[in-house]
Amino acid sequence: MKKMKKSIIAVASLLVVGVLFLAGCQSKDDSEASSKNVLRVGTEGTYSPFSYRDDNDKLTGYDVDVAKAVAKKIDYKVKFVEAPWDSMLAAFDAKKTDVVFNQVAITPERKEKYVFSTPYSVSHPALIVNKDNNEIKDFADLKGKTSAQSLTSNYAQMAEELGAEISSVDGFSKAVELVVDNRADATLNDDVTYYDYLNQKPDAPIKIVKTSDEATEVAAMFHKGDEKLAEKVDKAIKELEADGTLTKLSEKYFKKDISK
């Protein structure tokens, strides 16, 4: 009788352990399933017209809309994580986001560390100075000058390679402030950003003195090891290019096609 009781207790214990194990597996599967369809997108939220908040405090912009269109194509929910450029990249490196949609240029150095999609916009580097500055006329003139840049941007690297001293800022608007106040001699950024800024502030006392013929390709950036996700997004971007969505979004924000 005692042996029978012990057997019953043992079986019951095994059943309880089994149920708890299955419950744990189920909650894990449920958790994975719920997070599997969320695309965490890193973006600045202060970089008009690519990623910024409108008058109603709604996150919008070309890159934001491209990210939304991509998420819809691959049947993911999109969750934006906003932060200044350097903090945004730090959060990405800490894997707090899955992808960055924020005018990240494809460079050889970044390709060694990250995975990139097909480009979804193309621009050209521009050298921007105060309208009263007649000393800087070409990229070579940056040598020994101060250039206002986001520290980890490709334009900061470009300015350093040209011999400029970098004055760290968070975004193009802050860079322009330094140039206008003569606290920096110049800033490098893409021509598209410059013309959009002038559309919003036509009286801004700045000018482009030189534009590079070399195109800068911008793409979505992923972690190495996330190639499957990158392939999904890459396919979606190609479809958005083929069906004219990228062109429509470009014309919405720039009145011209910057997608190719």
Image (cartoon, grey):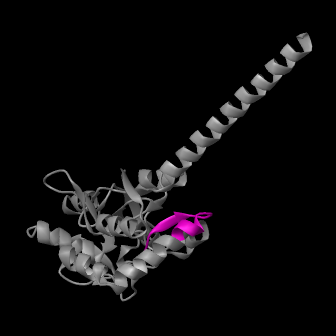
Residue at 29% in and 55% down = 45
Regarding residue 136, the answer to whether it shows in the image is no
User: Quick one: 210 or 200, which is closer to the camera?
Assistant: 200
In the rendered structure, does residue 227 fall within the stretch colored magenta? yes
Residue at 90% in and 11% down = 1
User: Quick one: 3 or 136, which is closer to the camera?
Assistant: 3
Residue at 56% in and 72% down = 111
- Judged left or right of residue 195, residue 90 is right
Query: How many marks are shown on the rendered structure?
Result: 0
Residue sticking out furthest to the bottom: 213
Q: Does 15 appear above or below 249? A: above
Where residue 159 appears, x then y in whole percent? 41, 70
Quarter of the rendering occupied by the C terminus? bottom left
Where residue 129 appears, x then y in whole percent? 24, 71
In the rendered structure, does residue 104 fall within the stretch colored magenta? no
- Range drawn in magenta: 219-230
Q: Does 87 appear above or below 180? A: above
Regarding residue 37, the answer to whether it shows in the image is yes
